Image (cartoon, rainbow, N blue to C red):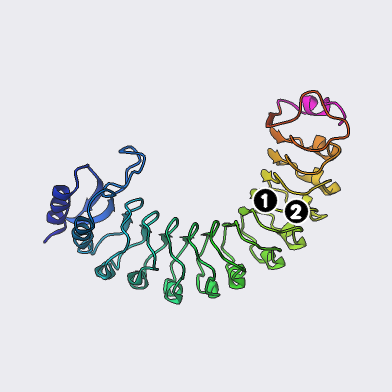
Amino acid sequence: MSDIEIIRALNAKIPYSFEYVIENNRCIKLSLHDESKSIFSGLIRHHSAAQKKEILELISRLEFLEELDLRKNLLGNIPNSFQNLVNLRKMNLGSNNLKEFPDFIEKCKKLEFLFLGCNQIGRIHSSLFGLKEIKSIHLHKNPIEVLPDEFQEFENLEIAHFYLSMIKDYPMSLFKCSKLKAISFGFNNFEYLPNEIENLKKLNYLTLICTSIKNLPDGLCSLNNMIAMRLFKNKIEHLPENIGQLSNLEQISLYQNHLKEVPKSFKQLQKLQLLNLAKNCFENIPTEIKDLKALKWLGFYDNPLIFPIETPIAYKLIKSKEELCNTPHF
């Protein structure tokens, strides 16, 4: 069957219109996901297992596919015939109740974007690290306890998400991925963030939430390209003294930690626009905040202030520096 004939066969089996792109009689892009169709958005989500198998077998014949989106279809498993899709660059298999890492992926040597989030995968095969072109990998919301410590093989890795997994420790090789721009961990019992994070000089976004971490490493302060950090619901008691060196930081959320003060260098964060210090242990509003000239939004509610202010600073839009400085007890 030609690619056009395969698309016609898919049209006959799928009651909704779906997105595809044909170039030179070859299908290079296919999506069976559409947020506008329903809350579930997977176009074959409610098909029978037998019907899904027939549809997947047809898709496996589209050997020129470069982009494939099958998320939210509750597929359960992917046939090995998908190993024919050797030209894939971008693939989304999220929210499909997959229980095992798909074997066929090791054949997709051109893959740059891999989304396996929101499944039931408990183990990651080392064969994953044979995909040398990977730039973005999403493994969040899977019951993964151990990640193979081979991330140095991903020389082009820019984005890595692992939050809401069951990972017990960091794969230290991840901190050798010098091109990383965004990384996330969360809902783990981590008690520390490795100082080796200082090796990630291009890091823009860091998410580290719901852990047992009490202190952050000094090496974090050397990441001058950092734009935003989500560090809420940890047990952080102190911030690094040199946090003010994060000269490009625009957002930081430290909601629900154990902070009582911020370092003096905090006032050097002159690009900071969003700051959330709510639900900590502050008895006074840190005076360093009034020197943050770019600040537009401040969260400070549920702190045990010695001098409670009449209108608590809670999700407050800052209209001017004067307004901030005139807040009582600053």
Is 26 left, or right, of 39 in this rendering?
Answer: left
Q: CA distance from mark 1 to mark 2?
A: 9 Å
Q: Is residue 105 above or below residue 221?
A: below
Is 187 left, or right, of 73 in this rendering?
Answer: right
Amino acid at dot 1: Leu
- Does dot 2 land on a helix, a strand or a loop? loop
- Pointer 2: residues within 10 angstroms few (<14), some, or many (20+)? many
Is 276 left, or right, of 52 in this rendering?
Answer: right
Q: Quadrant of the C terminus?
A: top right
Tell me the number on the disc at residue 173: none
The residue where tag 1 is placed is 231
Q: Nearer the viewer, residue 158 or 311?
A: 311
Q: Nearer the viewer, residue 311 or 266?
A: 311
Q: Quadrant of residue 85?
A: bottom left
Tell me the number on the disc at residue 236: 2
Q: Residue at x 86, y 39 (%)?
A: 283
Amino acid at dot 2: Ile
| Residue extent of the magenta highlight | 319-330
- Residue 12, image x and y in percent? 13, 48
Q: Nearer the viewer, residue 99 or 90?
A: 99
- Residue 105, image x and y in percent? 36, 69
Cβ atoms under marks 1 and 2 closer than 8 Å: yes
Residue 320 lies in the magenta stretch: yes
Sequence-first disc among 1 and 2: 1
Residue 55 lies in the magenta stretch: no
- Residue 280, image x and y in percent? 76, 43
